[in-house]
Amino acid sequence: MSKRNPEYDFAWCPGCGDFGVRRALQVALEAYSAEHEELQANNVVVAGIGCSGNMVHLVEGDQPFGIHGIHGRTLPIAFGVKQGNPKLNTVIVAGDGDFLSIGGEHLGPAANRNVNVTAVVMDNGVYGLTKGQSSPTTEFGKVTTSTPFGKIENPVSTLKLYMSIGVTYIASYYSSKPRVLATLIQEAMNHEGFSIVHVQSPCTTYNDTYDILKGNAKQGIKGVAFDIPEDHDPTSAEDANDLLSRPGVPLGVIFKKEGKTLQDRYEDLQAKAPKRTNDQLLDSYLLR
Amino acid sequence: MDKHDFVIRFAGEGGQGLVTSADALARAAAHAGYYVQTHSTFPSQIMGGPASSQVRISTTPVLSSGDGVDVLVALNQYAYDHHNEDLNPGGVTVYNAEEYDLPEGGKYFGIKADELAKSTGNARAANMVTIGAVAYLIDFKLEEIDVFITQRFTRGRPGDDEIIEANIKAVRLGVDVAKSTGFTVGQLQPAVAPDYQQIIITGNAALSMGAVAAGLNFYAGYPISPATTVLVWMENNLWGEGRFVHQVASEIEAINAILGAGFAGKKAMTATAGPGFSLMSEGLGLAWMAEIPLVVANVQRGGPATGLPTKSEQSDLYTCMHPAHGDIKMPVLAPGTIEECFYAGALATNWAERYQGPVILISEFGLAERGENIRRPDLSEISTESRTAVSEGDTGKRYDSWDGSTPLPGMPIPGGSGAYVANGSEHDEIGDTTHLPRHHVRLMERRFKKLGLLDGAHYEIENADADCIIMPWGSSKGPAREAYDRLREQGENVGWLYSVALNPLPEEVKTVLKSGKKIIVPELNYLGQWSSLLRMEGYNAESITQYTGLPFRPAGLVARIGELIGAGVTA
């Protein structure tokens, strides 16, 4: 259930990282709208399938438009929304399974196009909604319900993948500090081009990684998340690749590159392409 | 002998200019006032392989590619061996004497087109030598070919005049060869040129043009035979303010891209063939469930799997009607002629807007690349419908219940009022996911009830009181109509029923079906798909099937329908 719709019959588990991401998304959408003096209705949230996709129904306050589509297809749907109306602020919310497994084929084309959409990827390293199967980011050897004797595939190196295919804005964060996460999402929305904010969003039921991420002094666990050093230059691909060669989960903006978006390139072509009326088109077939 | 109708076939190997030759003859004849229809068959490879291209020229509108061939131009031995049997009695073959020879005494003669072309000073005029020979055989006016040549090669370049002169000379050399043999296949009756403006266009170009005429402004597609030319057409022509066209990475991307665009307010379309259509299944289910306007054209080829990419088959009807899991029955428009391709392209676009959902436009290889001269459509007669808008402060919700007694509630567009979630899960009034039975029931009914809004497609009913009624669909309309006309001429009591809309069927068509008369469905598939769908509705339908990858021939249909109705008819 949600505040605005008591009849809505979906809920995340207590402690789910997606609560924090929802809060961050809500703040970012409001801040973005205020910054650009746009209505909330100018935002479109394109949701994947899985626990995280339900976020589109749980955003509170003024409502954005949303599409809760089919598994893995957030990128092509968002492409259609954005190119259908380039004025819409188009944001994807999807999980690691949706975005990187079944939907992985769309990443390359989206990067090649530099389509001006923002993807907020919630990575919990597991398929939660179907009750705990191995996902593309599940670590090697991990026992899950679908890998009862241990996972025998390597996990995908998400940030390196984004970097290698040419995503033009890459940020990494976790779900625990929604205010900070919101500023990254807002920055990604403002980025002209394909932007991904990859968020570690733990599944408290099937893959609780809070301690691994943040550490736990009492149990002597040192967290793998680390703040990106202040001298990191996100406009430098070299710096970004160096950063990604370090183990652990960097927190902040990894890479940012200005350039033409698909829409910019399309408008360049539009200026050159012939513009004929329907009658002129039909007349080109006249039998003379 | 005077004849009103000739079929000329050029057979050989892909890359030998077969299509160019048939097209040149078609254009010259159309210009002279005849009705023409071309038909080609070729393997799925860029160059080489057995191929043929033919043109049917007639003083009356051409309904099909005909029965046999009156003039066969066989450019190699294989072509002669494989097409010779299609020659009509009285037909003549022109063979390529530079490639092979045939024993003396048959109804054929050899021609050395390359050698003769070289003697004109233009080696590239070889196909004009052949066309000259063909023109003599059917007594086609040479001046019309001269006009065609002059138009084609007047390109404002130096040397145009020499090229024109050489081509005209090449035609005369071909005529001389044919004349010296003493053969003729008859005299083509003079044409009565139609008094209206004509265009000469293929099925894929016509359906693209039709969709754009109704306001289509977003296209995403992926290359696949025989739908590729729709993508190419759009990439060339769908430019201008508010329009967008893009080749995407797969059919899955295409369907989801047009879903996003349709949601964002665009009139969006993609075109594909069987394999791509299969990949679009899940997206079509989402469009149905979330009620997103869009058009998918399935230009059928032979199936299943990769099947026959460059052959004619009508075997995707089941999948077009029921493309995805769950309770779905898509609106389906199936044009049967090039002209109908244009109007169905426009109507599909309008239907999608009118009922706020996906529409399937089912075409086929037999229409896709076939050229035909048709009346130039009057664009002022094409309506451009747009989904009902949501006005500021409208309290209606996107997924309100709807029983058909009021106008369909408006569809909110992002950026405007009425924010909702277009949801592929069952949902409540604003699109939030729900599993409550009452929502599944009321929206299931709404989705099916909306089909009732879809009318206005072309249909034909003749002699509906006959005991047997012929009801083809798609491109089988042409040969079936020729068969029907011949049966009527022979006094057989058969009726005619035809509908471009296969779902929903027009009420008038249903009335005929409900009469319980025997419905005979000629269709190019193994399962008898349309007749079985009609039987599912309780109608008395039976198929005449063919699954050769080739279109029906009217004579074959006359014989098979005759058998079914127990008539002693002659083809």
Image (cartoon, coloured by chain):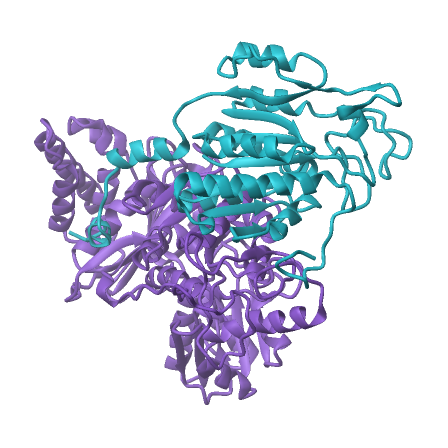
The picture places residue B238, in percent across and down from the top left corner, at: 32, 45
In the drawing, does residue B40 fall left or right of residue B151? right
The picture places residue A132, in percent across and down from the top left corner, at: 82, 40
- B116 or A195: nearer the viewer: A195
Q: For residue B210, which quarter of the picture?
A: bottom left
- A32 or B327: nearer the viewer: A32
The reply to whether residue B378 is visible in this rendering is no
- Is B420 placed above or below B153 here? below
Q: Color used for chain A?
A: cyan
| Quadrant including the C terminus of chain B | bottom left
| Quadrant including the N terminus of chain B | bottom left
- Is B89 placed above or below A175 here? below
Q: Residue at image x 62%, y 81%?
A: B538
Q: Residue at image x 50%, y 43%?
A: A30
The picture places residue B176, in percent across and down from the top left corner, at: 17, 42
- B435 or B220: nearer the viewer: B435
Q: For residue B88, which quarter of the picture?
A: bottom left
The picture places residue B115, in percent across and down from the top left corner, at: 24, 28
In the drawing, does residue A115 fall left or right of residue B4? right
The reply to whether residue A140 is visible in this rendering is yes
- B416 or B276: nearer the viewer: B416
- Is A225 placed above or below B427 here? above
Q: Residue at image x 22%, y 38%?
A: B129
Which chain can be seen in purple?
B
